[in-house]
Amino acid sequence: MIDFISGILIHTPFWVYLILLFLINRGLKARKPATVALEKLAIIPAIFLLWDIYDLLVFRTLTLATGSLWLVGLLSGAAMGYILSKRTVVSRVAAPRSIYREADYSALPFMMLAFAVKYVLGVMSAIAPDVLQRPGVSAFAIITGGLFAGVFVGKFVRYVRVYLAAEMREVG
């Protein structure tokens, strides 16, 4: 068993560890209140969206069914992320294109859970690619990918809405 696990860890591409370290760093930073530029807040949703779209294009056959499953996951996750972020105080600040946000204690757990699911599915695709082609496993991979990407998209949408609403009040 130890040989199996060490084999997986040794054969994991270096960039996967870099993404893990980056996500841990961002998740820990999110646990502190901060003024953050919208561009920085867009990085995590972009990473998960691009990673998921890549997985869809490389490991799936794009059909109406796969697209629909992914969209259901994405929209469900976006609603969840938006609702989670509604509990925190977010306000526009004087810095260009920036907001102040309270500590976000949900970011790190969601990032680690999303990473873990993606990692396990990646290992499965390397070890037993036929397993990921089974309808139930494939649907799980598609929906959870959309769900996790959606959580971060939903939070980002809330941040942008708060920013734009404050800007409209200033103009109006």
Image: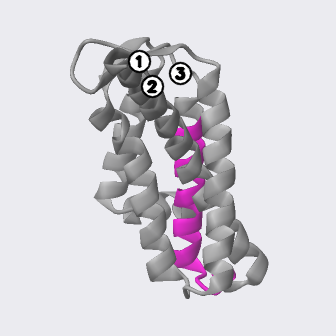
Q: Which residue is mark 1?
A: 169
Residue mark closest to the camera, 1 vs 3? 1
Residue at image position (38%, 51%) is 46
Q: Kindly state the secondary structure of the residue where label 1 is placed.
A: helix
Does the magenta portion include 65? no
Res. 16 in view:
yes
**Distance between the alpha carbons at the discs numbered 3 and 2:** 21 Å
The image shows residue 132 at horizontal and vertical percentages of 64, 79
Left or right placement of residue 50 versus residue 126 in this view:
left
Residue 153: image location, x then y, percent: 50, 45
Mark 3 or mark 2: name the one nearer the start of the chain: 3
How many numbered circles are shown?
A: 3
Q: Which residue is mark 3?
A: 104
Tag 3, which secondary structure?
A: loop
Residue farthest toward the right in the current orientation of the protein: 136
- Look at 55% across and 85% down and name the residue there: 62
Cα–Cα gap, marks 1 and 2: 6 Å
Q: CA distance from mark 1 to mark 3?
A: 26 Å
Q: Secondary structure at mark 2?
A: helix
The span shown in magenta is 110-132
Q: Which residue is identified by label 2?
A: 165
Q: Residues within 10 Å of mark 2 (few under 14, many from 20)?
A: some
